[in-house]
Amino acid sequence: MCTTTAQATKPAKRSAIVNGEDLTDTKGNVINAHGGGFLKVGNYFYWIGENRHDNVLVSCYRSTDLLNWEFRGDLLTRQSNPELADANIERPKVVYNTKTKQFVMWMHYEKRSDYSLARAAVAVSNDIEKPFTYQRSFRPFGNMSRDCTLFLDDDGSAYFFSSARENYDMMMYRLTDDFLDLKEQVATLWPGGHREAPAVVKRNGYYFMITSGCTGWAPNQAKYAVAKSIRGPWSELTYIADNTTYHSQSTYILPIIGKKNTSYLYVGDRWDGKHYFNSKYIFLPLTFRNDTTMEMPWSETCTPDVTKGKIGQASQNK
């Protein structure tokens, strides 16, 4: 991402996302939502992710078409809680609890000067667009917790996945009914596999997870696994995309549910480790030859159609 300017020019309405270019909001400011997640509420898709500008930690954007994004506010800042004053927050994900009527955020918590804490953290809000109330940070069942994601299943149960043991293990936990704590440590996935950046989706009764390898800021080839039950067994990991995942790292898989079709959108970060705010975004359709095989072809542009549930592509040269 690039530093936002004081006098941004309001852009024309966007008709497609151009992968790897700056993505701006409806006021012309570069979107700050890395490591983010997505949530559909009413007619709006919400995009919630990392914002490291001006003591902000997590920001919120909304869109009706997944193309034109309106900035709605900062959900967590260094002033939200004393524990956040010197914190780094990464990969925030939000789900809605229908029983408590609360939006619940889980994230990776570290200190700015020390990356050894490896903790999960939780925050809540009654309104997706309003500041969240920070709860606490902790190590799940005593395990390290770094790159992470949330997944809300069809039956209303929610799961937290995070990298543990210096990222060598991918842990899977089930949340309590209020989503504010962990009820159960379900499994250790691919022990010693050295995976991070999990993203989970369910399609036609099968669960898919994309993860990356651990190569710092440098990109590597993603792998995916599939399971009939979220509790496993999960398959072995299979390569997807090219040897750098098109110079990106996974953050989320978003189902686009239309009137007749459902498509699946990969969202990744194209990191610039030396200049964080020059990092970009990648939006690509995921395709499926059958119920257990996932593919991700490259496209320079991405045009989601939220009414039809389809994703258009153009210009296949990488």
Image (tube, rainbow, N blue to C red):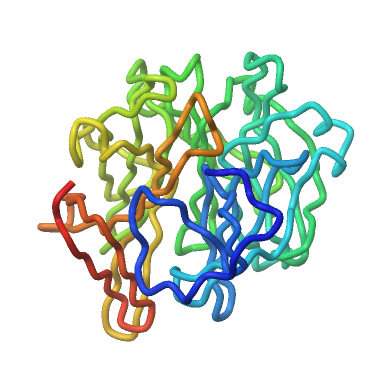
Judge by depth and name the residue closer to the eye, 314 or 83: 314
| Near-viewer residue (42 or 177) | 42
Q: Closest to the observer: 2 or 200? A: 2
Residue 258: name its quadrant.
Answer: bottom left
238 relative to 227, above or below:
above
Q: Is residue 226 visible?
A: yes
**In the rendered view, does 183 fall on the left or right side of 289?**
right
Residue 247 is situated, as x and y percent measured from the top left of the image, at 31, 36
Q: Is residue 288 above or below residue 26?
A: above
Q: Where residue 50 appears, x then y in whole percent?
A: 61, 43
In this figure, what is the number of numbered marks?
0
Q: Which residue lies at the image location 24% right of the left edge and 70% below the top edge?
A: 312
Taking the view exactly as shown, the residue that stands out farthest to the left is: 289
Is residue 294 visible in this depiction of the protein?
no
Image coords of residue 143 (percent x, y): 59, 20
Q: Nearer the viewer, residue 250 or 134?
A: 250
Q: How far across and down, in percent of the image, does residue 222 sit? A: 28, 34
Residue in the image at 51% along x and 77% along y: 64
Q: Is residue 145 above or below residue 241?
A: above
The image quadrant that residue 41 belongs to is bottom right
> Which residue is rendered at x = 49% and y = 14% of the image?
166
Query: In the figure, 70 relative to 18: above or below?
Result: below
